[in-house]
């Protein structure tokens, strides 16, 4: 049964001739909200309203972790035990006061429920190293184990005791949302006890009590929804002060043209713009504000080299020929350095990113706290590439020649730009150097990359903590190890030491040592990171800060 929207809301959206009220926000998007269950919500337009209604203990403000429902924390020397001091006087939307028992229940519930594709599953994987509730995991993950992991102490603080130090703890804490225990239990959710523990283990809770009637501590509370709208209003009892925009509608509009027109007419305050060509047409339009160069959070573009390609069409290791490459082609450091020097970043930014991209000097995301800005990344230089290739494979490669396979992805023009740059510069160096280009569907290309069959590949990777990024890219136990097929014991030792050291200040110099080593070895090289773009009404203030936090409460008119 459909719920009817409040009269105020209907009046707001009924007439396309009137601009949105000063105390309201209309955000037009391309997809509907499916579930706002905080343990499940993961995709963009589920996560967006969820973040407005629920809060974690900390907020990720563009890589800076700021206290939210916690006011601070302390950690044991080994980093395994973290004690959070909780904010006082926080109200849930139903009027009840948040207690440590609610926080304890919420964190335990996040560790327990949620399908394998849920937000909760990501938190479990990061904090507990549980990739899924397999029969083996179920034998050891008991209610007693869960209770020992998360509990309140006599002082009303939350104590989290993990089996190991987790460097990206705070990142997971930001999306472990706090919910009212009594309301959930009364609605038939997990009791918080051993009685129904097994029944809720790994349970898909997309249609839970919270999904139907969200109750959180956020600046906005749930009003109503239908297939094309999600409506919220400002929570007057919010501990941080009521937001300036009192009413929010997230509105699904399929047509790109209709969204852009609504923005121009003032019927939308923010509208998802499909591409930079459309954005360019909005520049100078009265009443519209265009943002062309917003930074992106926790993402980095990378070219990865595969040192042991799993393709039987290639030559055996070490064997050279003008019409092929050996499977260990990129195991030679001179080849890797040469290919890094063959990549023309200026052409890539101009042709692939329309001029809007941020230069990178390491494969960490641009705003990462461990970044080392003193490093000089590989630079486009054909003379350097020539010198390196003349040394490759004992000096034989330059004389023998090679043919390297390049792959592009259907529908992704940026991959055509990357392949074109490499082909042009490879074949410019030596008449015996060749590159072939084949086009694959994205799913097939991903399968080849993760199956170790691609010679090298471009991808976007990310993470808030350097351990997440660097271990994923370079460790033989990392998620991308099948795509790179190498093991460097020295690097593994450095990564482990940096991960296991407690505290950012102590870890920062260790990661800079890692980054310098990676810069020398050229196991990968960074691509310039694309900048984000957006369009809003001119009356809307605070969008750059919203870009950092995704919180509507920072916006005003």
Image (cartoon, rainbow, N blue to C red):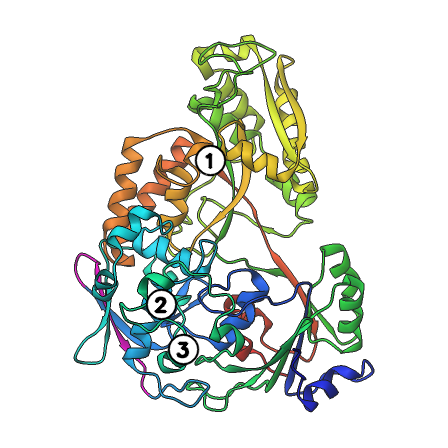
**Could you tell me how many numbered marks the image carries?**
3
Q: Residue furthest right?
A: 17
The answer to whether one can see residue 344 in this image is no
The picture places residue 221, in percent across and down from the top left corner, at 52, 82
Instruction: Tell whether label 2 touches label 1 (CB within 8 Å).
Output: no
Q: Which sits earlier in the primary sequence, circle 3 or circle 1?
A: 3
Q: CA distance from mark 2 to mark 3?
A: 11 Å
Number of residues whose C-alpha sits closer than 10 Å to that of mark 1, classed few (under 14), some (14–19) or many (20 or more): many
The picture places residue 160, in percent across and down from the top left corner, at 24, 66
Residue linked to disc 3: 184
What residue do we see at 69% from left, 38% from top?
Answer: 410
What residue do we see at 55% from left, 31% from top?
Answer: 448
The picture places residue 334, in percent across and down from the top left corner, at 45, 22
SS of the residue under disc 3 = helix
Q: Quadrant of the C terminus?
A: bottom right
What residue do we see at 50% from left, 52% from top?
Answer: 299
Bounds of the magenta segment: 76-88
When the figure is inspected, residue 156 is found, relative to residue 256, above or below; the finding is below
Residue 307 lies in the magenta-colored region: no
Residue 468 horizontal side relative to residue 158, left or right: right
Residue 124 horizontal side relative to residue 241, left or right: left
């Amino acid at each position: 049964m459909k719920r009817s929207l409040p009269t105020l809301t209907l009046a707001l959206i009924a007439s396309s001739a009137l601009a949105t009220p000063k105390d309201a926000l209309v955000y037009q998007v391309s997809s509907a909200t499916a579930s706002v269950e905080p343990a499940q919500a993961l995709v963009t337009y589920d996560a967006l309203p969820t973040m407005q209604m629920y809060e974690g203990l900390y907020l990720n403000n563009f890589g800076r972790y700021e206290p939210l429902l916690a006011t601070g924390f302390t950690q044991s020397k080994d980093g395994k035990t973290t004690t959070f001091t909780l904010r006082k006087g926080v109200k849930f939307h139903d009027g009840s006061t948040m207690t440590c028992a609610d926080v304890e229940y919420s964190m335990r519930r996040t560790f327990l429920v949620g399908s394998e594709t849920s937000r909760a599953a990501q938190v479990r994987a990061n904090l507990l190293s549980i990739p899924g509730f397999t029969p083996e995991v179920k034998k050891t993950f008991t209610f007693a184990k869960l209770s020992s992991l998360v509990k309140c102490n006599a002082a009303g603080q939350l104590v989290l005791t993990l089996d190991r130090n987790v460097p990206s703890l705070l990142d997971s804490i930001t999306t472990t949302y706090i919910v009212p225990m009594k309301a959930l239990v009364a609605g038939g959710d997990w009791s918080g006890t051993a009685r129904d523990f097994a029944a809720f283990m790994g349970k898909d809770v997309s249609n839970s009590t919270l999904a139907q009637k969200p109750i959180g501590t956020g600046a906005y509370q749930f009003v109503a929804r239908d297939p094309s709208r999600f409506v919220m209003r400002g929570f007057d009892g919010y501990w941080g002060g009521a937001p300036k925009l009192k009413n929010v509608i997230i509105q699904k509009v399929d047509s790109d043209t209709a969204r852009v027109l609504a923005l121009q007419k003032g019927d939308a305050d923010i509208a998802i713009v499909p591409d930079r060509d459309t954005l360019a047409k909005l520049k100078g339009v009265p009443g519209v504000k265009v943002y062309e160069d917003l930074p992106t959070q926790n993402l980095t573009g990378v070219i990865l080299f595969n040192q042991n390609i799993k393709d039987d069409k290639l030559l055996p290791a070490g064997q050279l020929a003008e019409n092929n490459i050996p499977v260990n082609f990129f195991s030679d450091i001179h080849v890797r350095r040469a290919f890094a020097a063959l990549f023309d970043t200026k052409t890539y930014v101009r042709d692939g990113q329309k001029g809007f991209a941020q230069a990178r000097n390491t494969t960490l995301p641009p705003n990462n706290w461990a970044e080392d800005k003193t490093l000089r990344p590989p630079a486009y230089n054909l003379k350097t590439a020539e010198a390196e290739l003349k040394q490759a494979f004992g000096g034989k490669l330059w004389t023998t020649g090679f043919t390297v396979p390049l792959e592009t992805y259907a529908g992704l023009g940026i991959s055509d730009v990357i392949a074109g740059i490499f082909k042009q510069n490879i074949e410019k160096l030596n008449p015996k150097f060749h590159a072939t280009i084949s086009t694959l569907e994205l799913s097939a290309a991903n399968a080849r990359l993760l199956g170790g069959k691609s010679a090298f590949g471009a991808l976007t990777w990310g993470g808030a903590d350097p351990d997440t990024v660097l271990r994923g890219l370079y460790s033989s136990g990392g998620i991308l190890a099948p795509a790179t097929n190498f093991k460097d014991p020295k690097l593994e030792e450095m990564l482990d030491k940096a991960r296991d050291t407690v505290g950012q200040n102590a870890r920062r110099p260790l990661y800079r040592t890692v980054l310098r080593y990676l810069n020398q070895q050229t196991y990968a090289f960074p691509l310039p990171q694309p900048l984000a773009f957006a369009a809003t009404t001119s009356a809307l203030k605070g969008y750059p800060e919203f870009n950092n936090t995704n919180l509507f409460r920072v916006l005003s008119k």
